[in-house]
Image (cartoon, rainbow, N blue to C red):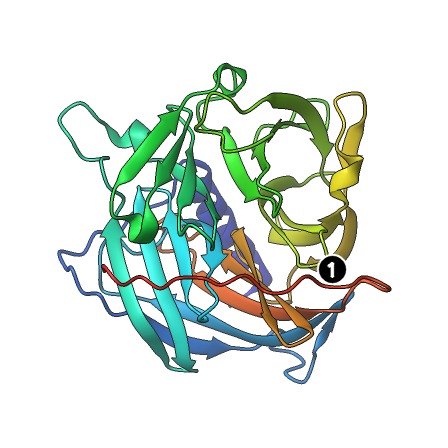
Amino acid sequence: MSPKIKRLALGIGLACVAVGGVRTIYPNDSQDIALNPLTLNPDNPAMRKVGELEFIAAWELHSRNGDFGGISALTALKDGRFVGIGDAGTRIGFGLTNDTKTNRPFIAPLPNLNGPETSYKDRDSEGIAYDPDSGQFWVSFEAHHAIRRYSRSFARMTGIARPAAMQNWPKNKGAESLIRLKDGQFIIIAESVDDGTHPALLFSGDPVEPSSNITQFRFRPPTGYRVTDGVQLPDGRIALVNRSIGFPQGFSAKISLLNPNDISPSAVAAGTVVASLAPPLLVDNLEGIAVTTEGPQIYLWLVSDNNFSIFQRTILMKFRLPSAPDKKKPEAMAAPGFDSL
């Protein structure tokens, strides 16, 4: 394919992404999720180093289920499985058995989002947070800006909040990133960017409880990028995935680390970039990030949102992150399984 044709095809693809993609609907409720191993750099399959990160593995995820895709956020359980949130109000769970098979996959709608008084605007789920002690989950939504809390295994919705501070955020650029800190505080970062910064909220506790105090602050992503997800690391730092889309380069991403002590209503917080992904390296519309540990090793997992588009893929990537110097890691917290699913 000539470079001119490649640029034309990319332009068409980006145009489709800009209007929400081309959704391909298959009348299939299969619960299978298949894996296809990928390399980081097709031109250099042995490449492993990306900034401060070490590339471990990557896969493209497939399913015949028409609700599979659109993964906007990711969280990890201690048993090695993951739960992703699709931007059509879908939860997507899986573990990794080997390079070609997932472990106990499931694809199911979130509870309480398909009643007669709800619409697709109530199902635009973008962020997920998880408490391994209680087994509860929190999911953030844009369009009709809200935070919903779910009981263990997503058995039922146990609360909803629509903070006033979120209601003036743009309908399609709302609560993109939802982060639960180990001390019980929550951070929500909007996708919208004004003067190069995101509006963001720090909750003193459970955002669904009216007793939680809200501190508004601003976060500055790398120039030309938007924060799409974040997670707190065992050493206390917050890892963020920042995504950009442009012509002719397509998608790119930067992984940054934020010190939560830098969050203040009187100053703009900003992270430090530790890795960049751009063509010819493997990259897509990266919107989710999760963290796991294996002994002293810390691993970051990235997942892409395919927007239900024929031009994009659902990609899962695994990287090793060097530990912060002179930081003692807290003990890992126990995490329940999805016994009711």
Q: Is residue 48 above or below residue 279?
A: below
Image position of 115 (left or right of 269): left
- Residue sitting nearer the eye, 237 or 70: 237
Q: Quadrant of residue 122?
A: top left
Q: Quadrant of residue 325?
A: bottom right
Q: Quadrant of residue 16?
A: top left
Element marked by disc 1:
strand
- The residue that mark 1 highlights is 275
Spot occupied by residue 54 in the image (x, y as percentages of width and height): 70, 73
Disc count in the image?
1
- Residue sitting nearer the eye, 203 or 1: 203
Spot occupied by residue 295 in the image (x, y as percentages of width and height): 64, 77
Q: Residue at x 21, y 51 (%)?
A: 25
- Asked whether residue 246 is in view, the answer is no
Spot occupied by residue 170 in the image (x, y as percentages of width and height): 50, 21
- Asked whether residue 76 is in view, the answer is yes
Q: Is residue 49 above or below residue 225?
A: below
Spot occupied by residue 40 in the image (x, y as percentages of width and height): 61, 73
**Which amino acid is tagged 1?**
Ala
